[in-house]
Amino acid sequence: MIPLPTVAKLLLAAALVLVGSDLATILAREWFGAVPGWLVVARAIVLGLAALVLWRWARLRVFAGLALVLLVIVLAQSAVGIVGLRRALQGLTAMDGGLFDVIALGIAQKALIAVPVAAVLLVVCRGPAKAYFGVGRLSAPVGRMALLRLGGDGLRWHVLAPVAALLIALGTFAGVLVTVFGGGSSPRMQYLLPMLPAILLLAALNAFLEGVIYRNAICGPLRGVLPTGALALFAGVFFGIAHYYGAPSGVAGVVLASVLGWFLCRAMIETRGFLLPWGIHFVQDILIFGMAVVLVLP
């Protein structure tokens, strides 16, 4: 039976993560067709007050750090949506006049979110190592993962990560091909090689920035506070909710992205570093952006 203090910590962490996530925004858009302007203010006030109140108790101070990081994410997300800034970024990130302009704009917006988040994380976590910004121990043992029925038997992350990257990329290929492109588009491979440098750059940046916003932001402040499984689950759900309008979209997209986020967070927590989860995510993004080139670009 889980001790009461641990249950209280789990509930508190879950509440903060949900407030800091896009859940309220998604529900407002789906139920009412628009997001009221006061919603982001309300979320910011809740997180700000939580940070102030939790800071008063030494035993809960780590949750004040989490609330502060989430507050920065909420405010930064709101700021990058300002029309004037968005237009300025569109001018700076123009690439092909089509799909890659949209991708580059999204990555530029994520960069403007990730920079202040990383800065606050370094303060809250008292250094890069505790915020999981280091390379980590690549040969760390894989902990038991009942969902995947592996780990806990001597398997090492430097062995599992390349295999996982390949399997995740193949699964993504099949899923996106069927759910987004319907399997009916004729691939135009002649566009792949000229766009390969852009694909690699955007994939590397996207994997890094999403890692900061959706993994480090949760795992760093709560390092050593929650059980590994619960911490990875919360960060995974935070990542999954952000992909409600992704590909695939809806609840299925959230579930799939949450499982991926959970796995990447397990890699981060158990290796105590950023490199392996970034690498797995990088490989997946190469495939996604590559598919966009050969199946979407004119």
Image (spheres, grey):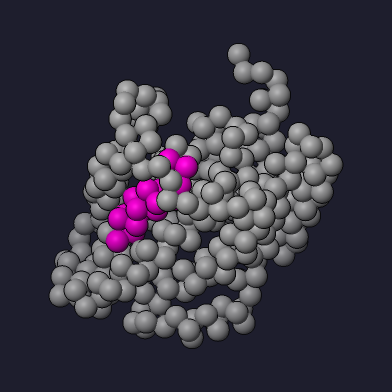
Residue beneath the point at 50% across and 31% down = 229
**Picture quadrant of residue 60:** top right
Give the left or right position of residue 291, taking residue 37 as reference. left
Front-most of residues 43 and 9: 9
Q: Does residue 282 lie above or below 166 as drawn?
A: below
Q: Is residue 69 visible?
A: no
Of the pair 212 and 22, the residue shown nearer to us: 212
Q: What residue range appears in magenta?
A: 271-286
Image spot of residue 98 (x, y percent): 36, 79
Q: Does 24 appear above or below 227? A: below
Residue at 65%, 58% in the rendered image: 120
* Side of 203 where 38 appears, left or right: right
Overall secondary structure of the magenta stretch? helix
Q: Nearer the viewer, residue 225 or 241?
A: 225
Would residue 107 be visible to someone looking at this image?
A: yes
Dividing the image into 4 quarters, which one contains the N terminus? top right
